[in-house]
Image (spheres, rainbow, N blue to C red):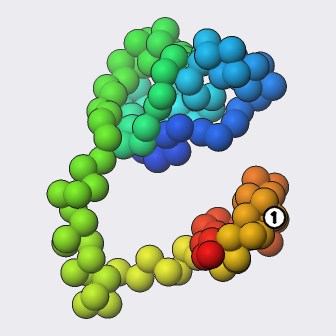
Amino acid sequence: MDAVIDAVGFEAKGSVLETVLTNLKIEGSSGFALRQCISAVRRGGVVSVPGVYAGPIHGFLLGDAFDKGVTFKMRQTHVHKFLPQLLEFIENGDLSPEVIITHRMNLSDAAEGYRIFDKHEEDGRKIILTP
């Protein structure tokens, strides 16, 4: 691929080793998605990271990225800049963000919602919790 987007950012969990490193404050995020992006992009390709990474990442494949001549483009997304236009798209019916919602649950069922999402059960992609 010419370009790959890591839209995961701050991952909730990774391997057992990565979880231990995160708990010891040696690592800020698992970096699994980022490593997959480096592996998937072609030589001379671009890895774009609009997500958020909080701290060091164990196993960052700098040597592999260097060998492939990968260009990294990264920063936090400017949500406030694009929000008015996105809201206009939604109001006009040009954008339908509700299509990604798979579950609507009460806030009291949050633990079950997180379990469904974590275990990839019931096609759980986006769970909306309401009080």
Placement of 94 over or under 33, stated as above or below: below
Identified at 60% across, 39% down, the residue is 11
Total number of numbered discs in the rendering: 1
Q: Where, by quadrant of the figure, is residue 123 drawn?
A: bottom right
Place of residue 80 in the rendered image (x, y in percent of width and height, measured from the top left) = 23, 57
Element under label 1?
A: helix
Q: Which residue is mark 1?
A: 112
Identified at 42% across, 42% down, the residue is 51
Place of residue 10 in the rendered image (x, y in percent of width and height, measured from the top left) = 53, 38
User: Is residue 3 visible from the viewing direction of this image?
Assistant: no
Place of residue 44 in the rendered image (x, y in percent of width and height, measured from the top left) = 34, 26
Residue nearest the viewer, comparing 2 with 78 = 78
Place of residue 83 in the rendered image (x, y in percent of width and height, measured from the top left) = 24, 66
Residue found at the very far top of the displayed protein = 63
Q: Where, by quadrant of the figure, is residue 125 drawn?
A: bottom right
- Relative to residue 80, is residue 23 drawn left or right? right
Residue nearest the viewer, comparing 129 with 42 = 129
- Relative to residue 54, is residue 17 drawn left or right? right
Placement of 66 over or under 110, stated as above or below: above
Amino acid carrying mark 1 in the image: Glu
